[in-house]
Image (cartoon, rainbow, N blue to C red):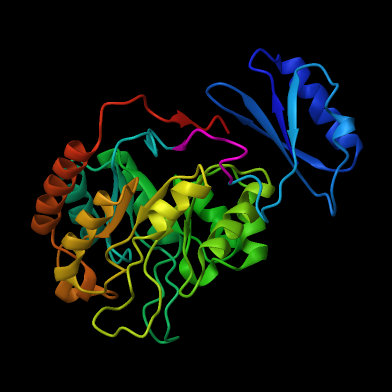
Amino acid sequence: MLIVMRPEATSTEVDGVLEIIKKLGFRGHVMPGATRTAIGITGNKGSIDPAYFENLPGVADTIRVTKPYKLISNDLKPEKSSIKIGNSVIGDGSLSIIAGPCAVESPEQVFAAAEAVSGAGAKFFRGGAFKPRTSPYAFQGMGEEGLKILAEVRERYGLNIVTEAMDEHGIDLVEKYGDCIQIGARNMQNFALLKYAGKTRKPILLKRGLSATLDELLLAAEYIMAEGNYNVILCERGIRTFADHARNTMDLSIVPAVRRLSHLPIIIDPSHGTGHNYMVEPLALAGVAVGADGLIVEVHPQPENAKCDGAQAITPTQFKQLYTKVMALHQTLTPASQPAQVSPH
C-alpha cells in the first residue's frame, strides 16, 4: 500500500502515519517529492485495510499496490530520483561519467588513469579492488590495499570512488574507503548481500545480472530499498544471448523500460556490454541517445598490459574523445529543464 500525504502535510503528520504503520507491525518508507510526500509500506503479507490511514491528519489518499515492487515504483515517487555520490550527483539531468580501470593493479596505473579521467572532466572514478573472475586462477584484485589506493585518488584528484563489493566484509571496507558500492552482475540476486547493502547508507550501483529480466533487476533494487537505503542506481551491462560478435548483448531498450516503471536513475556500461574496445564509443553514444543518466567506462593507460578485461578498455586519448562526443550529444538532446530532486536519504 502507498499512502499519499497532502501537499501541506507537516512532519508531525507524517510521523503520525509512520507510528501507525509501526504499531501494525510493518515498515514505513518516506519518499518526499516535489509536490507531495508518499509513504510506502513493506512487511505486510496481504492487503492492508485503508481505514487505518484514510482519516489520519495530512493523508490525501491510500493506494493499493498490485505490482511486486513498491519502493522503486513511479506510483510511490512520480518525480525522477537523483542520487548524491560524494560531491556530485547521478540522475539530476546531467550526464554522469564513471571511468577508470577494471582492476586496481598498482598506484602508478591507477593514478595515470585518474589523471586522464579527471582531466577530461569526469567526476567519478571506477576501479575494482575485489574482482569476481570466472577462473579461480585469474587476478582477483588487491583487496584493501587497492581500496587505499582508490581513497588516495579521491584525495589527489577530487574524484568520487565507485568500486565493487562481493561480500559483507567487502561492503564494510568499501563503505570505509569508497563513495559508492557496486553490486556486480554475478551478485544481483545474492539476496543476503542485497539486504546487507540496504543497511548501509552509501549509494549502491546495482548491475543487471547476466540473464536477468527487467522485473528481476527492479526487484533486486527493491531488496536494497526495503532495508532503508533508497540511494540506488541501476546499470545495464549487457546480457548473455546467442550472439557471439560481442562479449554480451547491450540491451539499450531497458533504459526507456525502466523510465516507464521506476524513478531510479539508470546508467549503461558499454565496456562490459560489448567486450571490445572499438565498440565502446558507438554504444556509449547510443546509450546517451536513449536517455541513460550516465556511462561507466573502462579506461586503462596501457590496455595491452591490463591484468583483466584489457580488450574492452580504452586509452586515455580515446576516453577524452569519447567524453567530448557524449557530452556534446547529451547537450543537443537535453532540453533546458529543472534538475531532478536529490534523494534526501
Q: Where is residue 263 shown, x and y percent of the image? A: 50, 42
Q: Is residue 160 left or right of residue 257?
A: left
Q: Nearer the viewer, residue 69 or 96?
A: 69
Q: Where is residue 113 shown, x and y percent of the image? A: 20, 55
Specify the quadrant that holds the C terminus: top right
Q: Is residue 308 left or right of residue 72?
A: left
Specify the quadrant that holds the N terminus: top right
Q: Is residue 260 magenta?
A: no
Residue 199 in view of the camera: no
Q: Nearer the viewer, residue 44 or 155?
A: 44
Q: Residue at x 33, y 49 (%)?
A: 292
Q: Nearer the viewer, residue 108 or 254?
A: 254
Residue 71 in view of the camera: yes
Q: Is residue 339 above or below residue 311?
A: above
Q: Is residue 132 above or below residue 75?
A: below
Q: Where is residue 25 shown, x and y percent of the image? A: 89, 43
Q: Residue at x 25, y 41 (%)?
A: 157
Q: Residue at x 31, y 83 (%)?
A: 243
Q: Where is residue 304 shown, x and y percent of the image? A: 15, 75
Secondary structure mostly seen in magenta is loop
Q: Is residue 201 left or right of residue 281?
A: right
Q: Nearer the viewer, residue 249 or 309?
A: 249
Q: Is residue 17 left or right of residue 7?
A: right
Q: Is residue 315 above or below residue 342?
A: below
Among the 4 quarters of the image, the one containing residue 38: top right
Label count reads 0
Residue stretch in magenta: 73-83
